[in-house]
Amino acid sequence: MKIAIIGGGYVGLVSAACFAEFGVEVAVAETDPSRLNRLLAGEMPIYEPGLEALVASNRAAGRLSFTGALPEAIAGAEAVFIAVGTPSRRGGGHADLTYVFAAAEQVLRALDHPAVLVTKSTVPVGTGRKLAALAAQLRPDLAIEVASNPEFLREGSAIGDFMRPDRVVVGAETEHARTILRALYRPLNLIETPILMTGLETAELIKYAANAFLAMKVTFINEMADLCESVGADVHDVARGMGLDGRIGRKFLHPGPGFGGSCFPKDTLALARIAQDARAPSRLTEAVVAVNEARKAGLGRRIIDAAAIDLRGKRIAILGLAFKPETDDMRDSPAIPAIEALAETGATIIAYDPAAMAAAKPLLPGSIQFAETASQAIAGADLLVVMTEWNEFRALAPARLAQAMPGRVIVDLRNIFDPAAMRAAGFVYHGVGRGSRPTGDATVDPETDEDQ
Ligand code: UDX
C-alpha cells in the first residue's frame, strides 16, 4: 500500500517513519524548502531519539521518500494524511486551521484518484465534517472519504508510542475507509492493540478529552503538592497512595513546575473554546488552563522565596530548559517565565540543557549565559534550580554538588534529588510538595518517575 503524508513536522515525520517501518510505502510532502533540504540530506529537523536511524533505514529500503511536490507525493496514494501544524490562534485559543484547510485544498485539487483523506493533526471537533463538505464541493467527480486518526505520541518516546500504542483511534464512516486504516495498522494486531472505530466527531473529541484529562491530573497533583508543603505532607506518598487505586492510576501524578509543550497548553485551551462555542462549557478544562498558567507565572517568585537569599550579584545555575527531558522543544516551557523573573533579581544566570539550548537562546533574556556541561553550569553557583528532569542531572552526586557550589541552596522543581541526601550534604533543599515532616520513605521512587 502507498500513502502520502502532508507535513514533515513532528507528527508527520514520526508517523511517516513508523508507517514505513510497518512495510507501507510512504511519501512525505514538505513545503518548507529548508526543512525539506535537511530531510533530503538525512538530517532530522527535530530531536527525537531513534528517529534519524529509522528514517535512514526506511529511505534506504525505498519505502520512505520526501518531496516538495505535493502531486508527486499523493500519486497513487490510497490514504493522504494531513499532519500540518494547528497552532493556537492569536487572542482566543481556538486552533488555527489555516494550514489544515490549505493542505486539504491542495490535495483535493491535485488528486486524480479516489483516496481517504485522514487528519492526523489535532483538529477541533467538526473539522472532519467540514473537510468532507470541501471534498464534495471541490471534487464531486471523485469518491473522497474523510477519516480522523489522532496521534497520542509523547515527545521523547514518540517512536515507541507509535509502535506500541495503548490504542489506535479511527473516526471513519465508510467501510472502505475503515478497511484502509485497519490495514495500515495491521502489524499492531500482533500485540493486540485495540483499534477503536468511531464516528468523525467522536475521534476528534477523544484526542482533546484525553489530553485535557492528563493535563488535569498533572494540575491536580501540582495543587496537592502545594497543599503538602503547607501541611507538612509528602506529595510522592500522596500520589502513590492515590495512584495505587486502579481507578485513578499512577501515571501523570508527578508534580512539577506546570505543564508545557506543544500539546497540553494548546489543546486544553482549544477544548475550552470548543466547549464554550458548543454551549457546553468545560469549567474543569478552563480551570486547568488558568491554574497552570498561574503556576508558571509564579515560578520565579516561588524560586526566589524558596532560596530566601538576596540574589543580587549571586550566581544561579539552571539545569534543564526544555519542557520535559529527551526533547529540544521549548514551546511553553515553564523555564521561560521562571528565568525571565530570575533575570530581574540582578543575579548572573548560567543555564544548561543537553538538547534545547539552541532553541532556548532566542526565547530567553539576552543576559543569560549558557554552559557547555552541567558541571560547568554548577561550578561556582550559589543557587541551583532544576527545571527539567534529564537523567544526567539525576546522576549528580550530592558531594560533588557541594564541592562545586559555594552556595548551598537547591530548588528542585522536578523532585529528582533525594532530600535527605542533599540535606546531609549541607544543602538547603526545596523540592515540590515535600513537606518537612518525616515520612516512611522520602526517596524518589523510580517507578513514579517512569510514570511520567
Ligand atoms: C502529550 C501527550 O502525552 C500525548 O499523548 C499527546 O499526543 C501530546 O501531548 P507531550 O507533550 O510530548 O505529550 O509530553 P508529556 O510527557 O505528556 O508531558 C506533558 C507535560 O506535562 C510536560 O510539561 C511534563 O513535564 C508534564 N508532566 C507530565 C508533569 O508535570 N507531570 C507528570 O506526571 C506528567
Image: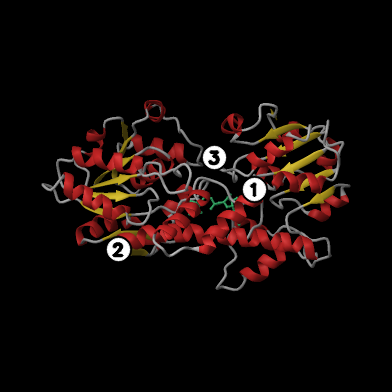
Say which element carries label 1: helix
Mark 3 Cα-neighbour bin, 10 Å: few <14, some 14–19, many ≥20: many
Say which element carries label 3: loop
Q: Is residue 157 above or below residue 106?
A: below
| Residue beneath the point at 40% across and 50% down | 122
Residue type at mark 1: give it.
Lys
Residue 235: image location, x then y, percent: 71, 63
| Residue beneath the point at 53% across and 58% down | 286
Mark 1 Cα-neighbour bin, 10 Å: few <14, some 14–19, many ≥20: many
Residue type at mark 3: give it.
Asp
Q: Nearer the viewer, mark 3 or mark 1?
A: 1
| Residue beneath the point at 57% across and 59% down | 287
Residue type at mark 2: give it.
Gly
Quarter of the image for residue 74 reads top left
Q: CA distance from mark 2 to mark 3?
A: 33 Å
Q: Nearer the viewer, mark 2 or mark 3?
A: 2
Dot label at residue 296: 1
Q: CA distance from mark 2 to mark 1?
A: 37 Å
The residue nearer to you, when weighing 111 against 154, is: 111
Q: Earlier in the sequence, mark 3 or mark 1?
A: 1
Q: Earlier in the sequence, mark 2 or mark 1?
A: 2
Q: Is mark 2 within 8 Å of ligand 1?
A: no
Residue carrying label 3: 329
328 horizontally vs 438: left or right:
left
| Residue 240 seen in render | yes
Residue carrying label 2: 199
Residue 240: image location, x then y, percent: 66, 67
| Residue beneath the point at 60% across and 50% down | 293
